[in-house]
Amino acid sequence: MSHLFSMRVSTLLVICGVSYLLTAGQTIHACFASVRQDGRPHWLCVWYEAMLAVHLLFVCTVSNSVMENQGIVLLWLHPVLLRVEPLLWANVLTATLGGVCAFRLRRPWMAAESVLLACCTPPVIDAMGEGSSLLLIVDVSFFTARVPATLALDIRDSKTSVSRLSVIDALDALPEGVMWMNERCEVLFMNDAMRASLTRLGLSTDLADAHGLWERLEGQAREVAVDQLLVDVDNEMTCLFVRDRAVLRRTPCERVMAFDVTEEVAINARLESVNRLLEAANEELRASMMQVRKVAEAEAIMRMKSRVHDTIGSRLSILHRFLEDDRDDPESLERKTGLLNGIVDDLAETDLPAASAGLESIRSAFSLVGVEVRIVGELPADERRVDVRICRGPGGAAALSVTNDGCVPEEIVEGTGIPGMRRIAAAVGASFDVSAGPPFSVEVVLPASEDGTVSEAWAGALGSEDQAFTSETQDERGRA
């Protein structure tokens, strides 16, 4: 290596300065390679790039030593001085790593680097003689082009590829808080969101010690579950803290995450309010249904009372007449049996019979006691209206009248029949009047409409002739 001492000082000064900068740049490139995650033989490439940085350090040392030592190439390391020439044998290892990387990565141009590094070993340098100075210039020139190019690629890849540095940046950008602690409660990593949440809670964000952090969070939580805490960070934010076990860099650790659940908590509060309102509405609905049920039961009772009075009551009266007679002939017994069976059948029916069927039942019952009920005309279409005599009144009004030429009562005592008839008349907008007479009469008048006609429900009941039910007794005329 003595031929290097014939080089100019200015040339050696330039080589020393450039190689120093290249060493720094190659070291940065080796750091980028150590955090890159691109599927290549990772640590092999990292070792190769690190050895290139060592090679450039030797170039810087050789050029500097040639300028200062005047014939002896030395590396000054406190507190000893080492000869650089034996250290250059490390270039053999670097050249070998370069050849392996060229083969594994299928990059033939890396073979040129391996050849250049192999030429920088002591035997080759001694064999080149005066050409060793040219080798030094070529070596520095090559890496002057290589190192800036690799740094430019590193900068480009750092913006698009996934690396350990980019993963850390991504974790810092997460809106959720993340923190890892080892078994000694030393914080291995904490992103910005977790640090901000702990700061707003007034807790320490010291990376050296996190003892009792979870217990302090429990003290401020409003809801506590297994490894879960719901904490009001302030009046504007609610966080859900969750902890579990994880492995980070082959180290068992505890992971704590903080999720912003402010909107979810607000939605749940609104849902609870709506549920309370729905429960109150359901209670009111149940109370209304109970009231409707009571009203329906009352209406059913009224219908039953009306039915008993209109149909079953008449049969019971006729049965009473039969029982007052002393007749025990077969014909009389047969009539009594038929009347009793009819009463039982009527009581067994749950649905109200049709008006025509009820009228026929009444006619049949009276026929058993010798009273002939003669029916002229047809019942109206509206079954709510039952009449004995229908005629046209003054102004086109419809009039219904029932008279009894029997004994006149001294006092009218209303049971269930007259109130029922009064209720039915009021339902259709008619007037209702009861007169003791003589004769005893019940009169219902339905006013005509504005055009002088009666309603459609009554129109079918009115014809050119009056419709009437006339009863004649065969044995006792005049009894009510």
Image (spheres, rainbow, N blue to C red):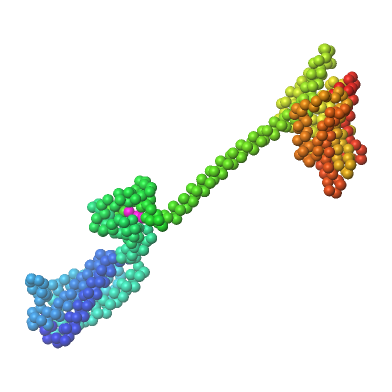
Residues drawn in magenta: 256-260
> In the rendered view, would you say 143 is above or below 403?
below
Q: Is residue 378 visible in this depiction of the protein?
A: no
> In the rendered view, would you say 49 is above or below 413?
below
Say which quadrant the C terminus sits in: top right
Answer left or right for 155 relative to 72: right
* Residue 317 occupies quadrant: top right
- Depth check, front residue: 109 or 240: 240
Q: Is residue 407 visible in this depiction of the protein?
A: yes
Answer left or right for 261 relative to 97: right
Q: Main secondary structure of the magenta part?
A: strand
Q: How many marks?
A: 0
Name which residue lies at 20% across and 70% down: 51
Name which residue lies at 76% across and 21% down: 341
Say which quadrant the N terminus sits in: bottom left
x%, y% of residue 231? Answer: 37, 52
x%, y% of residue 409? Answer: 83, 24
x%, y% of residue 154? Answer: 31, 72
Can you name the residue that lies furthest to the right here? 465
Is residue 291 magenta-colored? no
* Residue 129 occupies quadrant: bottom left
- Depth check, front residue: 158 or 109: 158
Can you name the residue that lies furthest to the front here? 410
Name which residue lies at 38% across and 60% down: 175
* Residue 308 occupies quadrant: top right
Name which residue lies at 21% across and 80% down: 18
x%, y% of residue 269? Answer: 47, 50
> In the rendered view, would you say 125 is above or below 172?
below
- Depth check, front residue: 454 or 36: 454
